[in-house]
Image (cartoon, coloured by chain):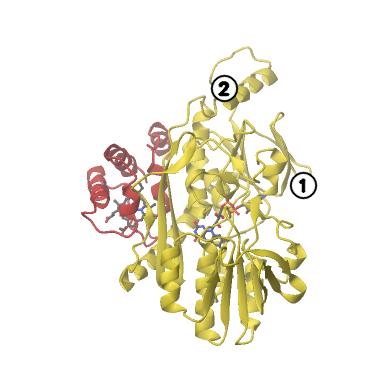
């Protein structure tokens, strides 16, 4: 079943290439170590590279990452609200290299699934037995009229952490008290379902404590959203008269933006912002399209036991780029998927079948500093799709006492420390 | 070192076991679980699952496991470093 055609094809190719006649299962290993190339050193790819070295130290693992340092999106909303330094978001790749992974700084621009070769922008060619793509998301510039790379320099998305995060932070700092901050949130699916609402909460906290005459308007292309009752309860208690959300039914869908006037256009209205944060529609990172593993939705269908592409054998997709059923596009999920994929690769490369997976996710959000909420899920494959285990998961209790919320905020910190250490070493 | 690696290879993680390290590590603020007694770990996990032990996250997560999953995970975690 899962991955069987690809593992057969992969071994078959090696046999042909070597001209060997021994059609035995362990041929890939007999001819030297199996090669896995990983593209993207974020929460998915970096975790996978290290986990694979643990699962089977004989596999030669190469990690291709465009940037010299990674800047984490989790906790970047705190940076935007002035609660945290951007430097605390940065992680290097020395720990991954120390695990015996060959780390190459470069951008993958081509994939030849037949020759099993990845090419980089500088012309380097890397051969693989199995390829893993964890490229995260691209902003779908063009999907929202008026929003392109140039517009993002005026109305930042800050949905990839780094310069964009810093830009939004500086705009908020420079804004005069009494200004209106507008955030637009996209329809599903997109990276980090509760992210826009955590961001709205923490910007509202900044306004309340530093610029109390200002307001925040959240224009939403959805009616329902993650941890909705917890967020709405928190907003009513903490930010009345400051934070207003307009749902899809009430005309919240933004149909066009105008960077020159910092305006958001909806069916009924035009909202002019002092600071405008556009969270645009997204799709799998470009290399997924190049490799042919993205479908018409812009995302990548996978087998849930191995995360092997349903479209191209020998290529696995994890993290935000994958269509992972009920699992959200989160760093927690990318890390959990990476470990499942690593053990599955170790099995596939020795012609064994991957185990049945059981995955978990937990996403923490802050309503204010020290005020944390969470949503959890447990997932098993059902008819080939990762599905919520009934009776498990769910959100933190509504109306939890402040001590419970403070405890969850501490656990969020502990999670971030744990996951970044596990991912980057 | 090599022995540990081999042991890890021989003992494939049972379903669900690789999720735990996303939250539990020594010195992170969340309590460390690796290398602890399997019976003790399974006991705590079952208590979260049943609700006998109050929790923030663990109860919600353990409800997704069957008793056999819990025993297998506890055994695996107990031999992790
Ligand atoms: C504001 C915000 C807050 C968030 N908060 C949380 C949170 O609290 N908890 C949580 O679990 N998740 C959170 N997330 C979601 C989390 O950031 C993503 O789900 C996670 O980063 C996905 O991991 P990934 O490996 O799929 O992609 P990424 O982490 O984006 O990594 C992709 C990497 O691939 C590289 N890359 C892409 N293409 C190429 C190429 N062709 N060649 C070489 N390198 C390439 C990129 O440079 C990048 O480093 C948040 C997101 C945002 C925007």
Callout 1 and callout 2 share a chain? yes
- The residue located at (42%, 63%) in the rendering is A412
Residue beneath disc 2: A30
Q: How many numbered tags mark residues here?
A: 2
Q: Residue furthest top?
A: A21
Q: Colour of chain A?
A: yellow
> Left or right: where does residue A191 sit relative to residue A261?
left
Query: What whole-number distance in Å separates the C-alpha atoms at marks 1 and 2?
Result: 32 Å
User: Residue at coordinates 71% horizontally, 68% vertically from top-left?
Assistant: A257
Name the disc covering residue A121, or none. Answer: 1
- Percent position of residue B81, x then y: 37, 46
User: Considering only vertical position in the picture, is B1 above or below B29?
Assistant: above
Q: Position of residue B58 (x, y in %)?
A: 32, 54
**Chain holding disc 1:** A
Q: Is residue A274 above or below residue A317?
A: below
Task: State the image quarter where residue B6 is shown.
Answer: top left
Beta carbon at label 2 within 8 Å of ligand 1: no
| Quarter of the view holding residue A148 | bottom right
Considering the numbered disc 2 on the image, is that residue within a helix, a strand or a loop? helix
**Is residue A397 left or right of A234 when viewed as pictured?**
left
Asked if residue A61 shows in the view, the reply is yes
Q: Report the front residue among A184 and A78.
A: A184
């Amino acid at each position: 079943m899962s991955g069987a055609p690809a593992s057969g094809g992969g071994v078959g190719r090696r046999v042909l290439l070597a001209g060997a006649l021994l059609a035995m299962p362990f041929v890939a290993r007999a001819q030297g170590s199996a090669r896995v190339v990983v593209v993207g050193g974020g929460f998915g790819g970096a975790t996978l590279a290290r986990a694979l070295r643990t699962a089977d130290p004989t596999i030669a693992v190469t990690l291709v990452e465009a940037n010299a340092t990674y800047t984490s999106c989790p906790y970047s909303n705190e940076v935007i609200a002035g609660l945290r330094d951007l430097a605390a978001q940065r992680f290097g790749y020395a720990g991954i290299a120390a695990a015996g992974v060959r780390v190459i700084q470069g951008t993958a621009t081509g994939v030849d699934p037949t020759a099993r070769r990845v090419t980089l922008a500088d012309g380097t060619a890397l051969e693989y037995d199995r390829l893993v793509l964890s490229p995260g998301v691209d902003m779908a510039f063009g999907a929202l009229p008026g929003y392109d790379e140039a517009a993002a320099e005026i109305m930042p998305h800050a949905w990839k952490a780094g310069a964009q995060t810093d830009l939004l932070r500086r705009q908020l700092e420079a804004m005069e008290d009494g200004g209106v901050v507008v955030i637009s949130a996209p329809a599903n699916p997109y990276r980090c379902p509760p992210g826009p609402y955590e961001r709205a909460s923490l910007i509202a906290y900044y306004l309340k404590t530093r610029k109390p005459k200002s307001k925040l308007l959240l224009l939403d292309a959805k009616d329902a959203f993650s941890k909705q009752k917890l967020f709405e309860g928190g907003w009513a208690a903490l930010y009345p008269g400051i934070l207003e959300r307009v749902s899809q039914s009430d005309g919240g869908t933004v149909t066009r933006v105008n960077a020159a006037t910092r305006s958001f256009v909806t069916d009924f209205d035009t909202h002019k912002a002092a600071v405008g944060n556009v969270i645009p529609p997204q799709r799998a990172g470009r290399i997924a399209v190049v490799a042919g593993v993205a479908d018409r939705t812009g995302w990548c269908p996978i087998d849930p036991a191995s995360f092997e592409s349903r479209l191209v054998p020998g290529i696995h997709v994890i993290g935000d780029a994958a269509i992972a059923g009920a699992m959200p596009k989160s760093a927690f999920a990318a890390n959990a998927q990476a470990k499942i994929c690593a053990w599955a690769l170790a099995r596939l490369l020795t012609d064994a079948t991957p185990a049945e997976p059981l995955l978990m996710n937990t996403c923490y959000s802050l309503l204010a500093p020290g005020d944390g909420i969470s949503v959890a899920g447990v997932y098993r494959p059902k008819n080939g799709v990762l599905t919520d285990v009934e009776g498990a998961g769910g959100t933190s209790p509504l109306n939890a006492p402040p001590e419970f919320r403070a405890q969850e905020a501490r656990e969020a910190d502990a999670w971030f420390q744990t996951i970044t250490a596990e991912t980057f070493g | 070192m090599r022995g540990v690696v081999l042991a890890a290879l021989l003992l494939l993680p049972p379903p669900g076991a690789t999720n735990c390290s996303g939250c539990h590590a020594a010195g992170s603020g969340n309590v460390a679980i690796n290398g602890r007694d399997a019976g003790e770990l399974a006991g705590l996990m079952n208590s979260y699952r049943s609700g006998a032990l109050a929790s923030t996250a663990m109860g919600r997560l353990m409800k997704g496991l069957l008793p056999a999953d819990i025993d297998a995970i506890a055994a695996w975690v107990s031999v992790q470093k």
